[in-house]
Amino acid sequence: MRTIILLTGLILFLISNLRSQPASWSPRGVGGGGALFSPSINPANNNEYFVACDLSAVFLYNGLRRTL
């Protein structure tokens, strides 16, 4: 009896996961979220700014090189 209940639960779980997936993809426009947080300034150099991002490491802005 326990085996039948487990198999039924497994089958229902698999069926629900197959139906929950999108059939096709479509563009939603520019952007996709993401957040920039923890801005900080280098105390030894006022031209260097650091900003953390939830999608990667830390961005560095250097006023002289103008790079991100």
Image (spheres, rainbow, N blue to C red):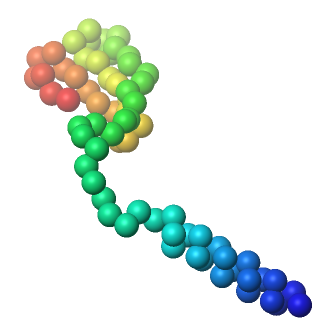
Up-down: is 19 above or below 1? above
Q: Is residue 64 left or right of residue 36?
A: left
Q: Which of the 4 quarters of the picture holds residue 30?
A: top left
Q: Quadrant of the N terminus?
A: bottom right
Up-down: is 32 above or below 2? above
Up-down: is 57 above or below 64? below
Q: Which percent across, then down, holds residue 61?
A: 22, 22
Q: Is residue 7 left or right of residue 3?
A: left
Identify the residue at image location x=19%, y=20%.
62
Q: Quadrant of the C terminus?
A: top left
Q: Nearer the viewer, residue 44 or 28?
A: 28
Q: Which of the 4 quarters of the picture holds residue 52?
A: top left
Q: Which of the 4 quarters of the picture holds residue 6?
A: bottom right
Q: Which percent across, then down, holds residue 53?
A: 38, 33
Asked whether the viewer can see residue 29, the reply is: yes
Q: Which percent across, then down, holds residue 57?
A: 36, 39
Identify the residue at image location x=29%, y=30%.
59
